[in-house]
Image (cartoon, grey):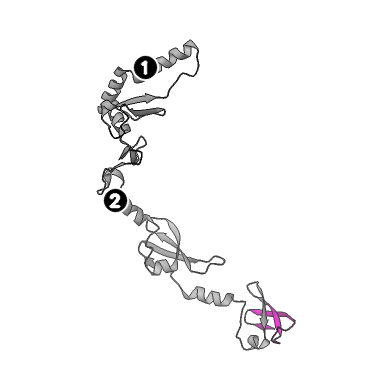
Amino acid sequence: MRFGKLLVTGSIPADKWGHTQWKCLCDCGNETIIAGGHRLRNADIKSCGCLRHDEAFNSFILDGKRYGRLIVLKRVRTKGDKESRWLCRCDCGNEKIISGKYLEYGRTKSCGCMRTAMYSNSPIFKRGKDNPNFKTGIRVNKEGYTFITCEDAAGKWKDRPFHVVVMEKHIGRFLKSGETVHHKNGIRSDNKINNLELWSQMHPYGQRVEDMISFCIDYLSEYSPESLAYAKKVAKA
């Protein structure tokens, strides 16, 4: 016999309360067991549960509605999804799946392009010296080194050792890998240029004369006073 979307296919032993249990096949393909034939005859149960889900699914319709920059295209139904989700097209052309409650409560008004535009146009979201609230922070760590907020060689704003920055300004370029700056008098807070010296950990790769000659030529071309002065002049220009 058929009851709603359920087709009775057989019976199984009664449950512990003595109710006859009926095996039913739903039109959606699911199999379910219903305890008590009176629940089927009285139309208390008409499906495996999918009918109730479909009714709830179809009772909340947002198709064609506009929310901010979003136009709702259709509802997206996924297995096990407990909340409504809707495919929306933004005025910028992007499509995005958004929760229905986010649309109804006004929490989502675009695919994200509004927030991106706000971040890129508002100075409050700019970083480094372009931010109106930017302050050049100076701090001293527990080891006694002074740090200052400035750009590094990659163009990122970060805390950098002040004695390194002073030396870079003096030679007109950023330090290279293997280069360090040393305090002559050992006082880490004394960052005057006459108290700083540039150290290099470079060394020749072998002991052959031709290797040493090549190394010395490269080293002098990089660190001779004339080369440092020229690099500083070029950096200022």
Mark 2 or mark 1: whose residue is earlier in sequence: 2
Residue nearest the viewer, comparing 65 with 37: 37
Does residue 68 show up?
Answer: yes
The one of 205 and 43 positioned closer to us in this rendering: 205
How far from the left and from the top, in percent, is residue 164? 33, 32
For label 1, count other residues whose C-alpha is less than 10 Å away and answer few (under 14), some (14-19) or many (20+).
few
Residue 14 to residue 203: above or below: below
Disc sitting over residue 40 in the figure? none
What residue is disc 1 on? Answer: 220
> For residue 26, which quarter of the picture?
bottom right
Instruction: Quadrant for residue 165, please give it.
Output: top left
Confirm or deny contact between disc 2 and disc 1 (CB under 8 A).
Answer: no
- Name the residue tied to disc 2: 121
Residue sitting at x 72%, y 84%: 14
Secondary structure state at the residue bearing disc 2 = helix
- Amino acid under label 2? Asn
